[in-house]
Structure formats: C-alpha cells, structure tokens
Image (cartoon, rainbow, N blue to C red):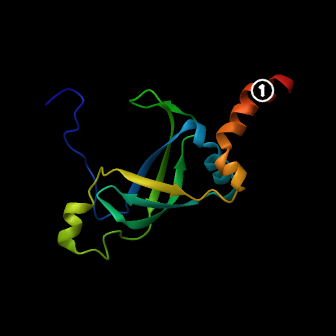
Amino acid sequence: VNRGNLLCTVANPDGSWKLRLTVPEQNAGPIVDEARQSGSLAVRFAAATMPERTFHANLDGLAYAARMDEAGNRVVDLSATVDGDPLGAIDADFADTSLRVGSDVTAKIACGQRTLIQSWFSDVVDFANRHLLFRFR
C-alpha cells in the first residue's frame, strides 16, 4: 500500500445516489449560465462499467470557483442526484459486478440550445474574444 491509495469508501447503497462530476474550466461557462437561470439541469450519464445503459440525474451542486486537479488542469466540481434507483431494472447478480461506488462516468448536461456555429467553433470564438477583441474593448 502506498501513501495516497484509496483504501475504503463509506457509502449508503440504500440512499439516493450522487454523482461527482468535474468539468474543464473552459467548458463550464454554459453550465454556470444555465444553472443560474433554471436552477436544476438534467444530466444523462453512462458508467464505464455499463456503457450500454443510460441513467438520468439532476444537477444540484455547482462550485463557482475552479480548482487544480491531479493532472494540473483547472476544473469545476459539480454534483448531481441520480433519479430513482438505477439498479431497479437490472438483474441483481449483474448489478453487483457492474455498477459500483467510484465507477467512472461520462455525462451530458443539458444547457439549453445554441447554434451549430457556436457548437463547432466555440474554441475559435473564445480565442478571438480573449486575444483579439479584448484589446479593443
């Protein structure tokens, strides 16, 4: 055992499930804006151990300050409460081996609609605002 290794996790499997999500700081703007306007956002996610299933949750916590993660990237922490019992419709033997506390998930957060140009070229628009247009404002 090395220093810093995770040895145990305390969890209540009978209670509501929570997701702890991290979003890169440069992608957090639309999430923060939509959370301010509507309060709770819908989240769809798939666990790495069960990628064929999609589960649903509601965003209920949002850090308004970024932090550095282990890799040195700036991230914003989010939390979401999973809707209902995600294991309710899954065979018990299969669920015990597939969906565990600490599993990695891939999530999509509904932040409203935007144009196709905004979606495809958001990095270009951000660069232009940050480095070109900033000097003329």
Residue 107 drawn at (x, y percent): 46, 55
Q: Where is 136 relative to 115, above or below?
A: above
Furthest-right residue in this view: 136
Residue 33 drawn at (x, y percent): 68, 48
Circle 1 SS class? helix
Q: Name the side, left or right, on which 74 lies relative to 8.
A: right
Q: Quadrant of residue 69?
A: top left
Amino acid at the residue labelled 1: Leu
Identified at 61% across, 49% down, the residue is 31
Q: Name the side, left or right, on which 35 lies relative to 9.
A: right
Q: Name the side, left or right, on which 36 lies relative to 90.
A: right
Residue 123 drawn at (x, y percent): 65, 39
- Residue for badge 1: 132
Q: Name the side, left or right, on which 44 lies relative to 9.
A: right
Q: Quadrant of residue 16?
A: bottom left
Residue 17 drawn at (x, y percent): 37, 60
Identified at 50% across, 31% down, the residue is 67
Q: Residues within 10 Å of mark 1 (few under 14, many from 20)?
A: few
Q: Quadrant of residue 129?
A: top right
Image quadrant in which the N terminus is located = top left
Identified at 70% across, 49% down, the residue is 118
Image quadrant in which the C terminus is located = top right
Q: Where is 123 relative to 95, above or below?
A: above
